[in-house]
Amino acid sequence: MTLKARLDPARSQPNVQREERRLARGRLKIFLGYAAGVGKTYAMLEAALQRSEEGVNVVAAYVETHGRSETEEMLAGLELVTPRQISYRGVLLPEMDLDAVLARRPTVVLVDELAHTNVPGSRHIKRYQDVLELLDAGIDVYSTLNVQHLGSLNDVVAQITGIVVRETVPDRVLDEADEIELIDLPIDELLERLEEGKVYIPEQAGRDVRHFFRPGNLNALRELAFRRAADRIDEKMRAYMQTHGISGPWPAAERLLVCVGPSPLSERLVRTGRRLATRLNAEWLAVYVETSGHASLSEVERDRLGQTLRLAEELGGRSVTLPGRSVAETVTNYARTHNVTKIVAGKPLQSRWTELLTGSLVDQIIQHSRDIDVYVISGEPTDAGGAQKIESAPRPLQWGRYLCSVALVGLATLLGLPLRPLIEPTNLVMLYLLAVV
């Protein structure tokens, strides 16, 4: 089937043009690690040599061997584009010769250390900008990156390690990479390599080594790398499902959705969802659907809803507010499009008679959920103090309900008058009982 046959005719031309631009652009493969010394450059060279043996035109534009003999031996098997020598403060520093690579036009080019800042006088400030130009020229690029150099994680890494990473790469570079290969090494082996002097440490960073290469820091960075790679895989899977019109969920990984609202029970739902997500090692989020009834919420209910959504964020989840007419349909549609595998909802607090008359939200969610599991949480609200405040607050008299009660009693009387000669008086009580119910 051709590309045009799969596209909506009304939008086929722009989509075809976008697809053509994507195909004309080079492909970026990033070898992602959690620290120096895990073997990113070695893995990149190993993959490049394999492509070269397959007959692919591969060159190395810039590779840091750091004096490691095994890395230098692998690099010797590839064609090398001689780096430029740029004078800076009286010292000649090597940088990738971007123009020479563009003139050479290989199929694949190796560019190590994606987060590197170029020497002043280079065409671009950052090396990732050189890589983007190579990709725009239709050249495939292999590059390496440590997770602590991602811009969005800069403050997190500083909090974990106590070291502020100066060289960063925008997350969009990783997000737009065509392939990410996670390079992992057990922490004990990395520390052993560090003691043996096999991990390159810049002289100016030597004083920070004992702080950075601590088992606790490395474990945290390793988890960040795993999560970032998993998020990318999940994004690609969801994009594939949407592109091919596949209805979710695909339970490749667990993802929980907790339905919250202004009810005091929502706090209990959030905490239960957090515990369940921890046991399943799953991502989770709290979702509130803003229907037309949102405008009639009291100030107390709005405050409680805001506190519930903030609690979800504090416990490590994401809070999402969605507009919609039907809570059940909005929640289940969002769950399917975001590959949610489990929905957590609260057991209604109203009476069974009210549920029969107005319908149960839980029943509606179950009806629309299809392949998504639904967990129903029962129990009293955990915020007892908040519940007492609501109960003790003065309520205005609802005259409509009193009038309705009088009308129902009057209706029962009217129905009973013609029946008095036909049935026993004690049976007439059933009519009034029906009005009471």
Image (tube, helix red, strand yellow):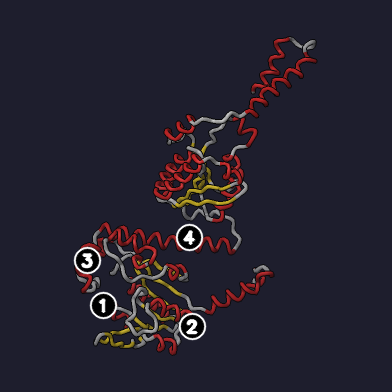
Do the CB atoms of the residues marked 2 and 4 lie less than 8 Å apart? no
- Mark toward the start of the polypeptide (2 vs 4): 2
Q: Position of residue 422 (x, y in %)?
A: 79, 12
> Callout 1: helix, strand or loop?
loop
Whichever of callouts 1 and 2 sits on the residue coming sooner in the sequence is 1
Q: CA distance from mark 1 to mark 2?
A: 29 Å
Front position among marks 1 and 3: 3
In this rendering, the answer to whether 53 lies above or below 147 is below
Task: Compare marks 1 and 3 and give the one earlier in the sequence.
Answer: 1
Quarter of the rendering occupied by the N terminus: bottom right
Name the residue tied to disc 2. Answer: 137
Q: Is residue 376 visible?
A: no
Residue bearing mark 4: 234
Give the CA distance from mark 3 to mark 4: 35 Å
Label 4 Cα crowd, 10 Å radius (few <14 / some 14-19 / many 20+): some
Q: How far separated are the C-alphas under marks 2 and 4?
A: 29 Å
Residue 182 location, x and y as percent? 38, 66
| Helix, strand or loop under label 2 | loop
Residue depicted at x 63% and y 33%:
356
Q: Amino acid at mark 2?
A: Ala
Q: Which residue is under mark 1?
A: 66
Q: Amino acid at mark 3?
A: Asp
